[in-house]
Amino acid sequence: MKIAVTGMSGLIGTALAARFVRDGHDVTRLVRRAVRPGEHAIAWYPALGTIDREALDRWGGDVVVHLAGEPVFGRWTAAKKARIRDSRVSGTGLLSEAIAALGRRPRVLLTASAVGYYGDRGAEDLTEASKPGDDFLARVARDWEAAAAPAAAAGIRVVHLRFGVVLSPRGGALAKMLIPFRLGLGGPLGSGHQYFSWIALDDVVEVVSQLLANDSIGGPINVTAPEPVTNGEFARALGRVLSRPAVIPVPPFALQLAFGAEAASVMMGGQRVRPARLSAGGFRFRCGTIEPALRHLLAAPHGAP
């Protein structure tokens, strides 16, 4: 297949591109800069609302995997929040409209979303059928998914990948946690009672690969492991894998000082998300429970760091 990917330099994009190439697919990057001579890429500038439509038309491919978006991590200034929203909603709208207008349209658009769609819901079990939340990230995710409507209206199969926290020592949340936890300074955020819906990067790659081949699946898919854990359970499991204590909680005021009140509030909340559609379809997770998953990801037999 011919696959175009946005956000290919990120944690998920890098892993997916490697899998696509290994599986014999032809991969084209969408890049936010001028394309160099001979480069297998298409220029697009979502902040400016422009994309090289001629290059996209010449590409004439089968699948678009859309992962690009401003990182959520960091202090949420007004400008940061605007970038978080616009990079997702405007970028998805631009891409969706562009591929819908092609003479030869791709057959599927796999577009990133997030479990933040559900908002902070405590211990409530959440599936793809659950209603959205109403905090900032939930509203962003709702509008992010809605922005793909032009592609769906044009007959393109659209899949919204509602990612949980993707775990890998090569980047993302787990990589940021490793230094303090290895120093024995790790612990839960606040009470640790908030739920943490996670998935190993290996399983993300397998999920996406299977969704490419399954033409019967569209709409939202929770890309999470089948057993969400509380933040405290996650911290204790990581401590055991690294043979380090994990008992020092991060107090809410410290998060507020570092990230601001709104971002800290989101970090202290959580979602207990189940991958109902993946489970119903018989998907077999390589990393279904948290401690074996961490041991696999960190290649730490018997908990040795």
Image (cartoon, helix red, strand yellow):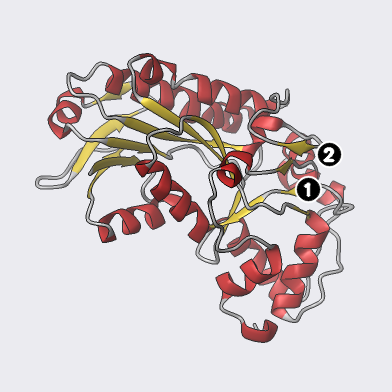
Q: Residues within 10 Å of mark 2 (few under 14, many from 20)?
A: some
Q: Secondary structure at mark 1?
A: strand
Q: Is residue 140 above or below residue 287?
A: above
Residue 233 is left or right of residue 113, and the answer is: right
Give the residue at x 85% y 48%.
252
Of 67 and 80, which appears nearest the observer?
A: 67
Q: Position of residue 148 (x, y in %)?
A: 44, 22
Residue 112 is left or right of residue 249, and the answer is: left
Q: Is residue 164 above or below residue 304?
A: above
**Residue 107 shows up from this direction:** yes
For the N terminus, the quadrant is: top left
Quarter where residue 143 is shown: top right
**Residue at image mark 2:** 122
**Residue at image mark 1:** 195
For the C terminus, the quadrant is: bottom right
Marks 2 and 1 close (CB-CB < 8 Å): yes
What is the CA distance from the residue labelled 2 to the residue labelled 1? 7 Å
**Residue 183 shows up from this direction:** no
Sequence order check, earlier mark of 2 and 1? 2
Amino acid type shown at disc 1: Tyr
Q: Position of residue 50 (x, y in %)?
A: 29, 22
Farthest-out residue, left? 38
Quarter where residue 234 is shown: bottom right
Q: Residues within 10 Å of mark 1 (few under 14, many from 20)?
A: many
Farthest-out residue, right? 191
Amino acid type shown at disc 2: Gly
Q: Position of residue 65 (x, y in %)?
A: 37, 39
Give the residue at x 61% y 48%.
224
